[in-house]
Image (cartoon, rainbow, N blue to C red):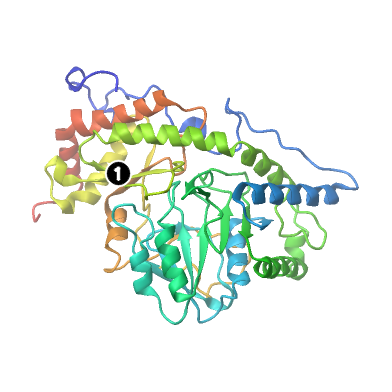
């Protein structure tokens, strides 16, 4: 980390006017995907001319075939948003009004309303892995439960062995959300092939992220694929405004397909996915080792049999290790966030707004196939692990990834060095700043 602790104990925090430890702001070069290794935008092939709509369709079909090869699925349907891919998953499974879908509490998910008003039932996450907990899933199953929405978080997966055992026992489906973890595996199987159907959104900080967004739905089942395709084509016919928007082909049957330029960019990123996943994995593993030496920081475990591509790097602050009461966790989290940012490393609170009782599948919302929502599924007393994540969770790389190409071990050592400076060399000052945030006299 650039020298022993004794050689740096006099370093003043940047938030107090000291010199930032990081030589550069390590999120600046990776604000989005779709860039070359030198940070320049990827070239986007533009399709023009009288046969442009035909070629647009061929590019989308080419991407779908490549997705099938990458995941081992039998069918893939590319579409203009992850929200639409999620809707296709519900349509293909026949899920509608009165049905319930189990979902990990405290999780972000961009989604449209489920057709006919199906309801999300949030359940707690595993306290060791911060992934969906199979035991909590089983406890939440009712006669109305039709699916488990298994969200692969942070770049890795929940325990699909446990989830499949529960799903098979109760005769319900697993919908895998692979957005955060493409390139990872579970039990030797690629992400995107672990559920009855899978969905993936191409936006945010996931391994595949393209300007304007996009998504893909995949399944092994012929009938489910047919139902999803029928819905997609029917939506095209029904929505003239969207059908003739500037960024999609204005021909029946392609309105909600992945637009040409986005398909081209997605193809390029999919071709580089294996190499990118290897770089992310190596960087994340190194940072995990370095961060394990930092007091006041707890890192989640990886599920046995899963690999990790580190689309983000969650951690929890632990005030007791710094001599503070547990109730100081939210104030400590905010203090550490501000100190680390000042040192040149971008870090976010896991929940940037209070976790509320949002229901992102509520049928009372105005219906829109392409509506994008960024909400947090509510938690309650029965969601203690999710509540703890909201209270003391921080995440590195959620929107600004330091794990992807061109970052390497030097970046990881610089990040860990900033945490060492804040949490070890200036632990007393961090406590002082934390106490200034909140009245702890009653603690």
Q: Name the spot of residue 351 as percent of width and height, x first.
A: 36, 53
The residue located at (91%, 47%) in the rendering is: 50
Q: Name the spot of residue 14 as percent of width and height, x first.
A: 29, 28
Residue 373 left/right relative to 339: right
- For the N terminus, give its image quadrant: top left
Pick whichever, 139 or 332, lies toward us: 139
- For the C terminus, give its image quadrant: bottom left
> Residue 341, can we see it?
no
The residue located at (18%, 45%) in the rendering is: 319
The residue located at (81%, 63%) in the rendering is: 252
Residue bearing mark 1 = 299
Q: Name the spot of residue 302 as percent of width and height, x first.
A: 36, 47
Count of numbered circles on the image: 1
- Mark 1: secondary structure: loop
Instruction: Say above or below: 345 vs 97.
Output: above
Q: Name the spot of residue 163 as percent of width and height, x first.
A: 42, 63
In the picture, residue 281 is in which quadrant?
A: top left
Q: Residues within 10 Å of mark 1 (few under 14, many from 20)?
A: some
In the picture, residue 251 is in which quadrant?
A: bottom right
The residue located at (62%, 67%) in the rendering is: 368
Residue 17 left/right relative to 438: right
Pick whichever, 331 or 316, lies toward us: 316
> Residue 114, can we see it?
yes
């Amino acid at each position: 980390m650039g020298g022993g602790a004794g050689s740096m104990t006099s370093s003043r925090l940047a938030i107090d006017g000291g010199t930032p430890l990081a030589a550069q702001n390590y999120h600046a070069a990776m604000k989005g995907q779709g860039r070359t290794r030198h940070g320049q935008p990827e070239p986007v092939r533009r399709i023009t001319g009288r046969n442009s709509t035909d070629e647009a369709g061929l590019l989308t079909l080419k991407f779908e075939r490549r997705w099938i090869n990458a995941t081992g699925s039998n069918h893939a349907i590319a579409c203009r948003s992850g929200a639409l891919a999620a809707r296709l998953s519900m349509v293909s499974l026949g899920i509608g009004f009165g049905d319930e879908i189990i979902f990990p509490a405290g999780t972000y998910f961009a989604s449209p309303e489920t057709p006919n008003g199906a309801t999300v039932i949030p359940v707690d996450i595993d306290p060791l892995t911060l992934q969906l907990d199979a035991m909590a899933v089983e406890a939440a199953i009712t006669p109305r439960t039709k699916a488990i929405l298994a969200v692969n978080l942070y770049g890795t997966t929940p325990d699909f062995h446990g989830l499949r055992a529960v799903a098979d026992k109760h005769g319900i489906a697993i919908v895998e959300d692979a957005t955060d973890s493409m390139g990872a595996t579970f039990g030797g199987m690629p992400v995107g092939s672990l559920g009855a159907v899978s969905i993936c959104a191409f936006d945010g900080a996931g391994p595949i992220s393209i300007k304007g967004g996009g998504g893909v739905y995949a399944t092994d089942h012929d009938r489910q694929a047919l139902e999803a395709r029928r819905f997609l084509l029917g939506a095209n016919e029904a929505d003239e405004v969207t059908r003739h928007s500037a960024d999609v082909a204005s021909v029946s049957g392609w309105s909600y397909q992945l637009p040409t330029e986005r398909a081209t960019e997605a193809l390029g990123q999919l071709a580089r996915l294996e190499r990118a996943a290897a770089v992310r994995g190596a960087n994340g593993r190194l940072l995990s080792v370095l961060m394990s030496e930092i007091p006041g920081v707890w890192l989640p475990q990886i599920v046995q049999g899963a690999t990790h591509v580190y689309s983000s790097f969650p951690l929890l602050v632990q005030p007791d290790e710094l001599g503070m009461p547990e109730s100081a966790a939210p104030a400590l989290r905010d203090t550490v966030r501000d100190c680390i940012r000042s040192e040149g490393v971008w870090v976010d609170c896991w929940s940037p707004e209070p976790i509320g009782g949002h229901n992102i599948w509520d049928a009372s919302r105005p219906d829109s196939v392409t509506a994008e929502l960024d909400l947090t599924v509510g938690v309650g007393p029965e969601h203690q692990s999710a509540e703890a994540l909201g209270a003391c969770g921080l995440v590195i790389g959620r929107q600004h990834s330091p794990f992807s190409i061109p970052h390497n071990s030097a970046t990881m050592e610089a990040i860990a060095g900033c945490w060492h400076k804040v949490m070890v060399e200036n632990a007393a000052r961090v406590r002082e700043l934390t106490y200034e945030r909140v009245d702890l006299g009653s603690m």
